[in-house]
Image: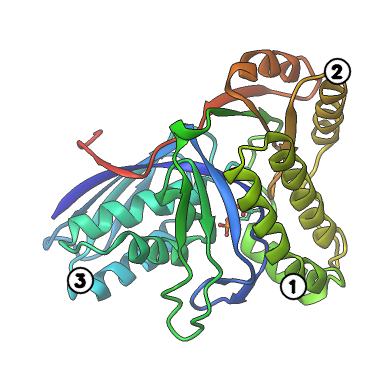
Amino acid sequence: MQAAARAHANIALIKYWGKRDSALNLPATGSISVTLDALHSETRVCFDPGLATDQVALESGGDPDRVSTFLDRVRALAGIDTRADVRSRNNFPTGAGLASSASGFAALALAACRAAGIDPSPAELSALARQGSGSAARSLYGGFVEMQRGRDDRTGADAHAVPLLAAPEWPLAVVVAIIDTGTKAIGSTEGMTRTAASSPFFDAWVSGAEADLTAMRTAIEARDFERVGELTEHSCLKMHATMLGARPGLIYWQPATLAVWQTLADLRAGGLAVYGTIDAGPQVKALCHAGDGDDLAMALSAIPGVRGVRISGLGPDAHLIADPW
Ligand code: PMV
């Protein structure tokens, strides 16, 4: 009744922003991401008949009630009522737009299912992780990953991720410029709800998604880095445009966020193949060829307001590990 798992964070190139159903956590659109080798969550779950309530220790922060609600789904699938002891940690800051919920719920889904004695298919596991956090569905897989919007609004069974390209097939790097590690004021669910309810740009965002996804899939298949980068920046800025149009408007950027963005444009003008993206937080994630990661990290760490940088290659599938505690 015990298992531990490691899952890696992911960064969306074509973004997910908006839900079509909040009970099942169904996305309004599909999305495409890369999984990061350097950022991961490790989670251990132990179902213990002696416990009266779930005991949840999130060493890197996070909401224990969300974990307990997620465990209820696993218990329902497994047909058990046993409470669990859960321990989890990340090797990066939680809740600051670095996708900690993605790696966290992916690791939790895998460890909890195994500990509960059930063995869902990869698609079922991804759909389950989605109910913890939309982006978590993608963190079950390594490399390039597509989250499918799905059509089944009754069960949500087809809203799950699929792998597009394994990490070794295209060695790229992501450099994260860390600007502020404080917890963000407005979480992604609240931000999405506000955007969908009040931004005049939201419908345009949803209707453009299929074309963006198709173009990105084609660019990845062709290993066309410039096209992947251009589509990535377009999706990012378009997502933030929907947020700016919400009432009240949502701005996750800080001055240093724009300073980094400008530096990426300057580096590109100077011949370095690099493109950026920003999630619901101030951090900038820059995509480059694997061999350019160190130079890029050096350039970004010199920008005032950048507190640190992390270089990552593309990472593997989520997997079971020996108990790390
Ligand atoms: O998985 P959530 O509910 O935290 O939403 C993730 C939203 C973005 O990170 C902004 C975009 C994405 O596709 O990861």
Q: Residue at x 26, y 64 (%)?
A: 120
Quarter residue 19 falls in:
bottom right
The image shows residue 54 at horizontal and vertical percentages of: 28, 60
Residue at position x 12%, y 61% in the image = 50
In the image, which is nearer the foreground, mark 1 or mark 2?
2
Sequence-earlier tag: 3 or 1? 3
Marks 3/1: CA–CA distance: 35 Å
Q: Amino acid at mark 3?
A: Ala
| Residue in view at x 41 percent, y 66 percent | 127
Displayed quadrant of residue 201: bottom right
Quadrant where the C terminus sits is: top left
Q: Residue at x 69, y 50 (%)?
A: 280
Q: Nearer the viewer, residue 96 or 29?
A: 29
Separation of residues labelled 3 and 2 (CA atoms): 56 Å
- Residue 193 in sight in this render: yes
Q: Residue 230 placed where, x, y %?
A: 77, 42
Please state if 153 lies on the left or on the right of 207 as rendered. Answer: left
Q: Does 79 sit above or below residue 146?
A: below
Q: Which residue is mark 1?
A: 196
Q: Residues within 10 Å of mark 2 (few under 14, many from 20)?
A: few
Task: Tell me the quadrant of ligand 1.
Answer: bottom right
Q: Position of residue 324 (x, y in %)?
A: 25, 33
Which residue is identified by label 3? 78
Describe the element under mark 1 as helix, strand or loop.
Answer: helix
| Residue 80 to residue 254: above or below | below
Q: Which residue is mark 2?
A: 270
The tag earlier along the polypeptide, 3 or 2, is 3
